[in-house]
Image (cartoon, grey):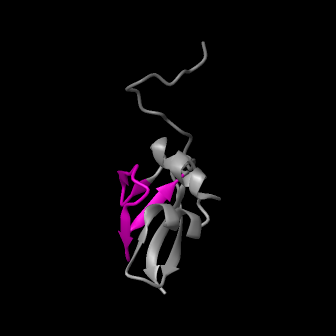
Amino acid sequence: MPNKHRRGERLCLPAGKFWWPDLSAILVTMFDVPISDDSIRLGQFLKLANLVESGADAKGVLADGLVSVNGEPEVRRGRQLAVGDVVAIDGESARVTRA
């Protein structure tokens, strides 16, 4: 009978063997995007950071709820971002920095 791992049971590995979870699905690429003003609108920032190709694309990803700002979902294209804010979409994060 094959050994199957059942819920609630401990997984036993041979001595010297270690199991590490695959974190690639949750790892996020973070990069800084400098702005010259004190703030920038979210739609403009998405384009500046090359997270979307156009304003129409920005509108679409925001409407679909795919964008978060500082870990909170955001749907407003006109949301004002300030230095230090972090925008995330599809595993990529961009931080607003001062130029």
Q: Quadrant of the N terminus?
A: top right
Determine the image quadrant of residue 91.
bottom right
In this view, 64 is above or below 72: above
Q: Residue at x 40, y 49 (%)?
A: 75
Q: Residue at the far right: name it.
A: 53
Viewer-nearest residue: 22 or 41: 41
Q: Is residue 13 magenta?
A: no
Please say whether residue 19 is visible from this viewpoint.
no
Please say whether residue 67 is visible from this viewpoint.
yes
Viewer-nearest residue: 47 or 7: 47
Rendering coords of residue 72 (x, y %): 34, 52
Q: How many marks?
A: 0
Rendering coords of residue 10 (x, y %): 42, 32
Rendering coords of residue 82 (x, y %): 36, 73
Q: Which residues are magenta?
A: 68-89
Q: Residue at the far top: name it.
A: 1
Q: Residue at x 40, y 60 (%)?
A: 78
Q: Residue at x 43, y 66 (%)?
A: 41
